Image (cartoon, rainbow, N blue to C red):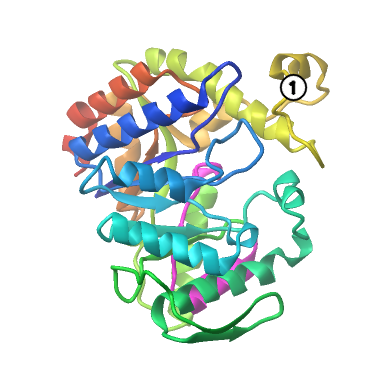
Amino acid sequence: MKLAIFTHIPWPEGADPAEIFSRTSEQIKYAEELGFHSAWFAEHHFSRYSLGSSSLVIASSIAARTTKIRLGTAVLVPTLHNPIRLAEDAATLDAVSGGRLDLGFGRGTFGYEYGGFNVDESESQARFQESVEIVQGLFTTTEFSYDGEFYSVNKLNLVPPTIQKPHPSIYIAASRTPATLEFMVSSGHTLCIAVVQDTAASLALCQRYLDLAKEHGRDVSLADVPFFRYFYVAETEEQARKDTESHISWILDIMQWRNIFQEGSEVPHSIDDWRRTRTTLPLSSDHVYENRAIIGSPEQCVTKILELKAQGIEYFGCNFDMGGISHDKVMRSMELFSKEVMPHIL
């Protein structure tokens, strides 16, 4: 089983962004020491939910501090970028990291993220597909040209070229619409599974991916699919719940809160003020514990990971740093994972 670490790089009120970035780097360096295969970074904009507005910049910084761990995006939102510039930045990161880049793409969460970039949500599927095709084309073709509905490219040569040939692996999050899954499979890319989707639904999506790939004559395996879950291990289940409950609640609250904004965002406001005035509640933390997370004692975590392994999952991603949980607790959880969980799942 390959192991990954994943982070949204959350930014709770009162936290210093520079310190958060520094601690994230420490966590990735420690993951490399522990033998993790890869580290993945989300892209979000204008929100305390995530400091990952420039995930390729973040990954480049961490590339300079590591030597072996692969660096992935889960996911970049290409519809919010110029695809030519995106290809250049990705190729540069692939070069400076020594060929350690994995590219995950997705259509994002819409709302004020799309509005802030003045991108029409109704065009997101077509823009997304064109962007991915252009990035891949620039990776693989000299004097690449493309004439689409939204983008045109005329005889461009990508500088620098990617180190990985024919290009870095491309993963696509396809949780929303069949059109994205169809595009992913027909284009020869690989599925990735987000933390925000329930495990049962994620496994069902994996099966649709396998079935559709078979229809297209592709031989794919779930062993290549990164499967991310909220993750935390402590000496006991009680301690694991105590350490994480307020942070799981923060994630659920910020996801609900940020979705009410059509313009602006929640950044200048107080989450406690909003909590006192909201009229509906988000999902419960118990729902996350039962359906989106592996959180508990070492024995419980081993059992749940092996259950996923029995379903064909061979690439498991841990979101240790969730909702502003302290750096010390994240590092302790990672250490306990390496000593008490990893020997039983690898």
Can residue 207 be seen here? The reply is: yes
Residue 327 at what x, y percent from top left?
38, 20
Query: Along the line of sight, which residue is nearer the eye, 122 or 58?
Result: 58
Residue in the picture at 56% in, 60% down: 174
Magenta part of the chain = 177-199
Is residue 190 in the magenta section?
Answer: yes
Can residue 223 be seen here? The reply is: no
Residue 225 vs residue 152: left or right? left
Residue in the picture at 65% in, 29% down: 254
When asked about the image quadrant of residue 27, the answer is: top left
Residue 193 vs residue 177: left or right? left
Which residue, given by chain and number where applicable, does mark 1 sit on?
269
Residue 339 vs residue 45: left or right? left
Residue 118 at what x, y percent from top left?
77, 55
Residue in the picture at 62% in, 30% down: 48
Residue in the picture at 22% in, 41% down: 345
Q: Relative to residue 75, is residue 49 depicted above or below?
A: above
Query: Along the line of sight, which residue is nearer the eye, 224 or 283?
Result: 224
Badge 1: few (under 14), some or many (20 or more) residues near its Cα, within 10 Å?
few
Q: Quadrant of the C terminus?
A: top left
Is residue 175 in the magenta section?
Answer: no
Query: Along the line of sight, which residue is nearer the eye, 103 or 25?
Result: 25
When asked about the image quadrant of residue 78, the answer is: bottom right
Residue 150 at what x, y percent from top left?
70, 75
Q: Amino acid at mark 1?
A: His
Q: Secondary structure at mark 1?
A: loop
Residue 34 vs residue 12: left or right? left
